[in-house]
Amino acid sequence: MGRSDDKQSGRSRGDHAGYYRTLGLEPGASAAQIKAAYRSLAMELHPDRNPGRDTKARFQALGHAYAILSAERKREQYDADSVVREAQGAASESMSGAPPLYAPIYCSRCQAVSAQPRYRVFYTVYGWLWGADRKASQGVFCGRCEFRVGVRATATSLITGWWSLTGPSRTCQAVYANFRGGDFEYQNARLMGCQSMYFAHTGKIELALAVAAQAMDLVRSAPANSPDNPVGNYPGNSAGDSAGDSADNLSGLAQSLRDLMDAYAGRSKRTFLKTYRSWSNRRIAAQGLIAVCFALLVASGIGLMFSTSGAADLNAHQTQDPTHSPPRALTFKAPGFILPPSGVFRPVYPNPSGANSSFAIEQSANQASLNIALKLVNPVGSHKWLKLLRASDESEILSLFIRSGDTVEVAVPPGAYRAKVASGQTWQGEEARFGPKTQYATSSAPLQLGIDRERSKSIVVDLAPANVSVKPGDRLFNELDPASF
């Protein structure tokens, strides 16, 4: 366990069996300090290294202390048991045989006297590039302090605990431990039992009876000899070394609580308290919400990263033509749809004469020097998908995508062609085009490209909408039925 960052009063922690003292440490020492102290003292006290001294008993006691303090769960139970013993030590027996005087049990954090004190341990993980540190916040808490410390430890661990190789695993372990807060039913039963006795001795009978009833519930749910409840069962402890040993002590506590409730039965009205676990349930719910939000945030970030890279690769593979259009940065126009770059969308070169493929290739090579440079200008306003078809048989020569405000230049063989244009704002794929609002148009007259040898080999076509007035010489477009596109 790490070092506690909570304020500790004299009643909250101790070293009832002297294990920290055996190692020369104070309660709250780190795991690394415990390990280093044990190694140093083991070398010093080993019987083989001390032939003239009897160090066997001290060496065995050192081993017993290290066995408890080096095991996380046993150390948690030992620290919690020390708190219970210090609370019990506040009850002093008078020489005249008068009833013991009980002192109140305070919250380790806010120093308030809570009707339902409970011992808890919460962990915070800090990840570094070279490792991860874990810090424990432990002590006797009231309900509000348990909620605040537990939620803060979980939230901080989720933010700061991941930044090392061991950070993720240690963070998950810490978050799980923070949900539980530790298994201290035995110790918490004794704390609430002592607190109920204090309330009874100060005249707060109704409150004392309500706390005693909840302490009885904890006694019933806390098996005295469970592995997680090794009070009085530490190696080296004798049966008389513990004032709170095993089942006899739980039976004594239960009998004291029954005597208290029987003594005031029917003499005062019943006071109802929220259940002992009400604040714990709130804390667990808040910690769960934080963990779920963090998991969703991480999952959405990873999903966005993979979807963006995958969509970019697919779009680049399907739509870019390095001959006619340089690579361009892709932009998102709508969720799930990527706007292609301007350029050749799909080149198609059918056999113009119907001859075999070798003749078509030879003919294409001979006409390569006669190709016409066709420049298509798309004014700012809408994106356009253009199909160029041969006028004689309506066979498609090529398809282009031209963004708003872009100009694309392609080389086509001489001939008469007809253009079909689909325009819109949001590209939704080749099947849907620009969605229900797609506008369709076709050229009002065929484009005569290079038929007259005296004409220039460079032709500019302005893709202005049909309802916009154009300058003389610009090519006009008429509306087209979507089914004919």
Image (spheres, helix red, strand yellow):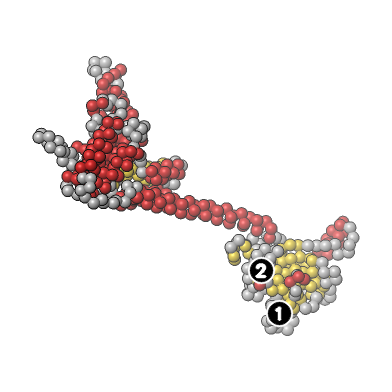
Q: Which residue is mark 2?
A: 435
Q: Which residue is mark 1?
A: 466
Q: Residue at x 34, y 47 (%)?
A: 277
Vertically, is 448 above or below 351?
below
Callout 2 amino acid: Gly
How far across and how far down the image is residue 139, in percent? 28, 43
Left or right, 94 with reference to 453: left
- Asked which quadrant contains residue 44, the reply is top left
Marks 1 and 2: CB-CB under 8 Å? Answer: no
- The image quadrant where one finds the C terminus is bottom right
How far across and how far down the image is residue 421, in percent? 72, 72
Left or right, 123 with reference to 255: right
| Disc 1 from disc 2: Cα separation | 20 Å
Mark nearer the N terminus (1 vs 2) = 2
Vertically, is 323 above or below 47?
below
Q: Residue at x 25, y 34 (%)?
A: 252
